[in-house]
Each structure stands twice: as C-alpha cells, then as structure tokens.
Image (cartoon, rainbow, N blue to C red):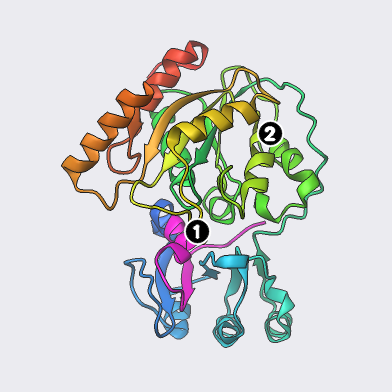
Amino acid sequence: MLVNAPYLMFLGDVGDQLAAKTAHGIVDWRREWCLGQLRLPNCKADLGIPEMSISEAAAKGVKTMIVGVANAGGVLPDHWTAVIVAAIEAGMDVASGLHTRLGSKPEIAAAAAKHGRKLLDVRHSHERFDTGKGTKRPGLRLLTVGTDCSVGKKYTALALEKGMRDAGMDADFRATGQTGVFISGRGVAIDAVVADFISGAVEWIAPAAAPTHWDLIEGQGSLFHPSFAGVSLGLLHGAQPDCFVVCHEPTRTTMRGVKHPLPSIQDVIDLTIRCGALTNPAIRPVGIAVNTEKLGEDEAKTYLASLAKTHDLPATDPIRFGVAGIVQKLAEMYPQSAGKA
C-alpha cells in the first residue's frame, strides 16, 4: 500500500488531542510530509501546523488527505463525508486508519470512481496470515507494553529505533497500528486482524532474522484493559519478545474509556512475563518509558529516578530525556547485538 505525500491532515471535529493521535504521530515523525491541517468547527485537537482548506491544499500540491483520527470503534461519521468527497474532487487520494472503510460510504466510493482517486484503508490488510505457531525463530525482539492504551508504546519503539541505530545497532521499527504503518510504510493494524490470526500476523511482521538484529515491535492496548487485552495478548505471543519496555502515563487514575483503575508497573511486568513465557521463556523487562508531558521537569526527573530505583531498570521519558539508558541496558544484556558506533 503506497500513500503518496505530501499530506493534508483531516481531524474532523474530534473531542480531544488523543483522538487525533494518528495525525499527531505522523506529524511528529514525518513532519516534512504534512503541509497543513483541516478541522471542522468544535474540533478540540490541534497539530500545530498551518490551517488549510481543500482548495489551498490542492494549490500547494497535496496528494493525499489523511483521516488522522483514532476514535472509539474506528467509525467514520456521516457528516465527514462531504469533506472527503471535496478532497477527492480536488484531485486528492484519501487514506484512513479507521475500521470503517472509506468505500463503504456510497458518496465517497462514487467520487473516487468518477475522479480516478485511490481510497486507502490502512487498517485493512490484503495479506493472508497463518495462525501463530510459537516456534522459536532467530533474531532479537523487543515489545513495548503498557499500563493502558495511548501511553507512548509507538513513540517509545520509534525512539529506540533511532537511539539504537545511532549506537550502531541493527534495529527496525515494526508497526502494528495504523499510525505506525503510515510512518514506516509497512506493517499490519493488528486490531483489524481476525482473532485467530493475530499472533500469526505478528510472526509475519517480525520474522526470522540475523541473530544480532533487533525488531522493535509496537505494542497495542494493555493486558489489563478490558476492551483490548485480547489484542495485546495475541500480539505478545506472536512477538515472542526477548525483552520488553513498560510504557506508562503517571497522571491517570483509570484506563482510557473505561472505569477500571490502572494496574501498577510491577503488575504489568509480572503478567507480561507470565504470559510471554509461553512463546519465549527467557522474556524479561529492560526499561520503563513514561509520558511525563503533564509533569514539571524536576517532578518528572524525581519520579523517573524513583521508578528506576524501585524496579532496578532504566526509566525515562523517551521524547523528553531520550533512551540512552535503555539502549545501554540492551547492549549489556545482549552484548552480541551491541553496535560499534
């Protein structure tokens, strides 16, 4: 699936910043591709890039409008249809990471057919996957896991890819969500795979590799989240990770979208080891990644130092403070993969 840049990011009228996390992720990691944003009245998300109408975007040479939202259930509201049709009529392809297929809206399908434009449903793969086998395969794998959904698992994996490559290590980010696929150009939106084939799809995403090669697999959901634990467990078994990083947002009291309290970091470590041992008995934690955006700098540093001491693991905010500590820990624990930079 080829999504042609540059992009216009469409945010609709989402109710908060997290609902636009797909768009935020693309802007954060592929800023040069994103020329502007288009928001409907009452939109509560802002990417911090220029506001742009359909006609202005077309004049600037935008090739694809990205529906950059991740709402509950992945639905495409009917009142967004007119904007999408207008983008098609202006000569743009349209790409979406929602569960609802763009072409399921008759007006959108008709406009694309009439104007010869592509509708790209990134969440829906055309690959056929086997069931997972759990057979040990060569290569090294790291999975990001979370105390909740939307706590930085993708950003942590991408930051680790950069940090490990800078250290001379052989590492690749492996996308398991629609935003990651937009960023990397390859991967599978695991939450859209039929349940029996989730672990097999992850085995396809991160296949056998050289003994010193790292696949950094983007986690999804949380083993403790009542909505998404099934996806998280299948992903864990298919990833067969040698190690994992726990991702956390410290100001939440309940998990996103439900009333269940957040598990502790130690709870996540213990359950990940217990469940992950099915396909890799050697699984172990290698670090803690915390989204400290809502904490002051001194407060964040104090909190991270406390976590590091409590769990005897490097703890950091990958975006704010970098991932050098986790990269060093990986080099110490897996010296065969240590780079020469």
Residue 269, placed above or below residue 28: above
* In this rendering, the label closer to the viewer, 1 or 2: 1
Query: Callout 1: helix, strand or loop?
Result: loop
**Three-letter amino acid code of the residue under disc 2:** His
- The crowding category of the residue bearing disc 1, from other C-alpha atoms within 10 Å (few below 14, some 14 to 19, many at least 20), is few
Residue 38, placed above or below residue 2: below
Q: Position of residue 180 (x, y in %)?
A: 54, 50
Which residue matches tag 2?
A: 237
Q: CA distance from mark 1 to mark 2?
A: 27 Å
Query: Is 6 a magenta residue?
Result: yes
Image-quadrant location for residue 235: top right
Q: Position of residue 303 (x, y in %)?
A: 26, 37
- The crowding category of the residue bearing disc 2, from other C-alpha atoms within 10 Å (few below 14, some 14 to 19, many at least 20), is many
81 vs 52, nearest the viewer: 81
Q: Examine the rendering and report whether any part of residue 215 can be seen.
A: no
Q: Examine the rendering and report whether any part of residue 24 can be seen.
A: yes
Which residue matches tag 1?
A: 259
Q: Is residue 111 left or right of residue 168?
A: right
Residue farthest toward the left in the current orientation of the protein? 298
- Residue at x 69%, y 40% (from the top left corner): 234
Q: Position of residue 200 (x, y in %)?
A: 76, 39
Q: Is residue 274 left or right of residue 27?
A: right
Q: Position of residue 309 (x, y in %)?
A: 30, 23
In the rendered image, the quadrant that contains the C terminus is: top left
Give the extent of the magenta segment. Answer: 1-26
Image-quadrant location for residue 339: top left
**Three-letter amino acid code of the residue under disc 1:** Lys
Q: Is residue 273 left or right of residue 302?
A: right
